[in-house]
Image (cartoon, rainbow, N blue to C red):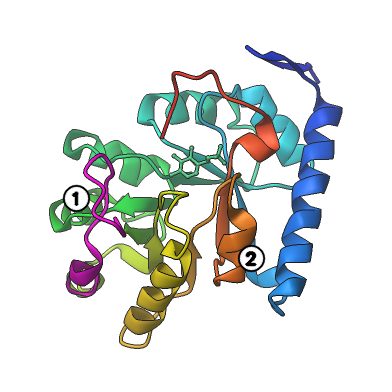
Amino acid sequence: MAKNTDTKGMTTDSQLARRLTDVQGRIRVAAKAAEREVQTIRLLAVSKAKPAEAVRALASLGVTEIAENYLAEGLAKQAQLADIPGLCWHFIGRVQSNKTAQIATHFSWVQSVDRLKIARRLSESRPQALPSLNLCVQVNLDAEPQKSGVLPEEAFALCRQIAALPNLRLRGLMAVPSVSRTDAFTRLSALYAEIGARMRGFDTLSMGMSADFEQAIAAGSTLVRLGTALFGERPSKSGV
Ligand SMILES: *Cc1c(COP(=O)(O)O)cnc(C)c1O
């Protein structure tokens, strides 16, 4: 297998393995501290701005859930990795309405749904031969203008409308809260519990990134989305 390189020097497969072991250990410690079973927390590898070879190396270490933010970049990597069975691709970036058909065809999850129009289009274009498309509703907890997401007070209504659409399976909530809002994870967790009590099938609370996944686990995250902690720093131009 080829060694992986990135723009900030070499990332070898052994470095990747070390980072993965470290992250898994930290997830275990955080779960234990929160008196949670570690199996209730899934690891999602965010590979934006990283080469397909790095994803291949991670897959060989047993990580199968992979997330991309940009459609073209995601499709290119999927094509390069088509020989690997069992990879599960999540779309976590802003969903443009002219890209919904391709997203609905090539991904198993879309975590960044914040409008009914987008959910409708995903529903209409999900191929019948595939299982239902898994969705999370993205919440903009603090109404930050630069971020996607439905406002917390509008989340339940959107969830109810999405749940009525065919070819979709609404699984839960996702957010990218500002690190400075230290209570954001507990607020999202409360919203998730409140909506989950009124909806069938809610089982995914997607929160926590490289800088804050331990706090997210303490607050009840069931899926942490890790880029930097697994793959190393990204070139600075690729943000959220
Ligand atoms: C980039 C990104 C991540 C991963 O960020 P890191 O800080 O590198 O772990 C997680 N979630 C979303 C929505 C992202 O855009």
Q: Is mark 1 within 8 Å of ligand 1?
A: no
Residue farthest toward the left in the current orientation of the protein? 117
The disc at residue 231 is none
Residue sitting at x 32%, y 46%: 104
**17, above or below 158, in the image:** above
In the shown orientation, is residue 112 left or right of residue 25?
Answer: left
The disc at residue 118 is 1
* Mark 2 crowdedness (10 Å alpha carbons): few <14, some 14-19, many ≥20: many
In the shown orientation, is residue 174 left or right of residue 162?
Answer: right
Residue sitting at x 60%, y 21%: 51
Q: Is residue 160 magenta?
A: no
**124, above or below 32, in the image:** above
x and y, in percent, of residue 35 in the image: 72, 80
Element class at badge 2? loop
The residue nearer to you, when weighing 132 against 196, is 196
Q: Please state, as top left, top right, bottom left or bottom right, where the C terminus lies in the image.
A: top left
Q: Amino acid at mark 1?
A: Ile
Q: Quadrant of residue 96?
A: top left
Q: Is mark 2 within 8 Å of ligand 1?
A: no
The disc at residue 41 is 2
Number of disc labels: 2
x and y, in percent, of residue 237 in the image: 44, 18
Mark 1 to mark 2: distance in Å?
28 Å
What predominant SS class does the magenta segment belong to?
loop
x and y, in percent, of residue 84 in the image: 66, 37
Q: Amino acid at mark 2?
A: Ile
Q: Which residues are magenta?
A: 140-159
